[in-house]
Amino acid sequence: MVQRQTLHFARALLPEGWQNEVSVRITDGLITSVESDCPATEGVEQYAIAIPGMPNLHSHAFQRAMAGLAEHGGGNSDNFWSWRELMYRLAAKIGPDELRIIAAMAQIEMLESGFTRVAEFHYVHHTANGARFSDIAEMSKAIFAAAGETGIGITHLPVFYAHSGFGGMPPADGQRRFTSDIDLFARLLESCRAAAKALPDATVGVAPHSLRAVTPAEICLLQELAGEAPIHIHIAEQVREVEDCQAALGSTPVQWLLDNANVSGQWCLVHATHVTEAEVTGVAQSEAVVGLCPITEANLGDGIFPAKDFVEAGGRFGIGSDSNVRIDMPEELRLLEYGQRLTHRSRNVLISQDCASTGRFLFRSAVTGGAQAVGVDAGLRPGAPADFVALDADALHLGRNELDSSLDQLIFAVGTRAIDRVWRRGQCVVIGGQHVQREQIEGEYRKMLTGLMA
Ligand SMILES: [Zn+2]
């Protein structure tokens, strides 16, 4: 049976900008028409302010379970690499059931914060001792099952991981759950593509983990396996990684990739924190999206991406919750801008000539870049999935004719408290700021976590 519905918003952020009295028609989860200056008719559901759902272009859902558990110790030896040890110990304990529950909890928090689709960069493929599950995609299926429960849109990114360092070094013990050769990976990918069909709009991309974990020859093969699908890679997150890459490949990681892979709009370069001026221009010209994860990058002490220069060069970016230490869409955007303010000692840095509001520029750019990276349409326009967010006008203290200030207030002042409802493919999954399944999934999550940490 065809499902039709109409929603009405007093204000809505459309691709062409803010409009009043907007009527949105939805058929089978897709937007079929958007009309402005169209007063509400009786019986139609009405809300105050609509903005598009935000794509979350980079997540490792299982890491949500260690959020807040790596914030002690200290000293010069406490860095990304010591954090990674703890992450490996956690990864070793997680089976398909645990992963499904943790991912569902993380996805609920994503939806509540305004993310409506997630690109899950998934590398825990095998059993704890490295043996294969009888169904090679068992762990990936746990991610799809979670998305089925929570309703979030999913772009699944099975990760190819083969080596512990540059030069094809053999994997370390803590990495045996992650590693595959190309043939095994091709089977995994096939199986993920079949499993994705169980959900209405799940897609599957390909993720070479990093230049540390994948050789140049393997990058070539993975590009072939990807076809037209999104390709995501971790790159230049750590100074040590840049130095190791220079020693092994004779070039910095981003430059090496630009010179040796067909980097295009199909690619998402996650982090790209440590880049030269030439790399900034090169990535912008390639039309690849840079996947910025400001909360995680701050938490891990990675460094600050030169976003001002990149935006001025016409570069595209989106945001990701990565380690999920906090899941908060407005906070990712706030921290992105604040990193630039602290670097340049000025205000309202990420902005463009056609957009006076920093909040709107950040939001609009991250929706567009994020949608490109996750390989789906986004925005309040016909043909796109009906994924959007209603803001609470009272929480935002809006006066009349101050529409741009709604995104400025959401990002810089009020945060997720202003998020009232969230729709995914036309289904209202968040009401009054809370996911409709939160109570049940949170209960399961707490019980499971107590067992896991025992
Ligand atoms: Zn990551």
Image (tube, rainbow, N blue to C red):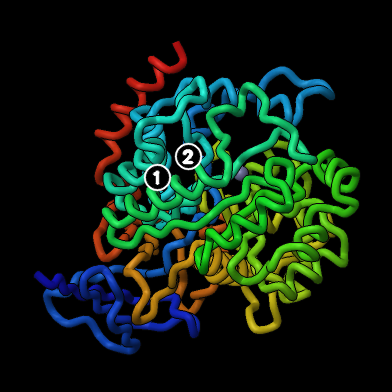
Residue 312 in view of the camera: yes
**Which residue is drawn at the image coordinates 74% and 67% (left, top)?**
283
Residue 213, image x and y in percent?
69, 41
- Foreground of the two, 243 or 180: 180
The first of marks 1 and 2 along the sequence is 2
Q: Residue furthest front?
A: 183
Residue 127, image x and y in percent?
45, 25
**Which residue is drawn at the image coordinates 65% and 84% (left, top)?**
354
Tag in front: 1 or 2:
2
**Which residue is drawn at the image coordinates 57% and 35% (left, top)?**
179
Residue 110, image x and y in percent?
43, 48
Disc 1 crowd, CA 10 A, few/some/many (<14, 14-19, 20+) = many
Please indicate whether residue 316 sits to the left or right of residue 127 in the image. right
Depicted 119 relative to depicted 4: above or below: above
Disc 2 marks which amino acid? Ala
**Which residue is drawn at the image coordinates 74% and 75% (left, top)?**
285
Classify the position of the N terminus by image quarter. bottom left
- Foreground of the two, 438 or 179: 179
Quadrant for ligand 1 reads top right
Q: Are marks 1 and 2 in contact (CB under 8 Å)?
A: yes
Q: Could you tell me which secondary element the residue under label 1 belongs to?
A: helix
Classify the position of the C terminus by image quarter. top left
* Mark number, residue 42: none
* Mark number, residue 61: 2
Q: Residue furthest bottom?
A: 37
* Mark number, residue 107: 1
Residue 330 in view of the camera: no
Depicted 16 relative to depicted 309: above or below: below
Please indicate whether residue 430 sits to the left or right of residue 414 in the image. left
Determine the CA span between mark 1 and mark 2: 8 Å
Disc 1 marks which amino acid? Gln
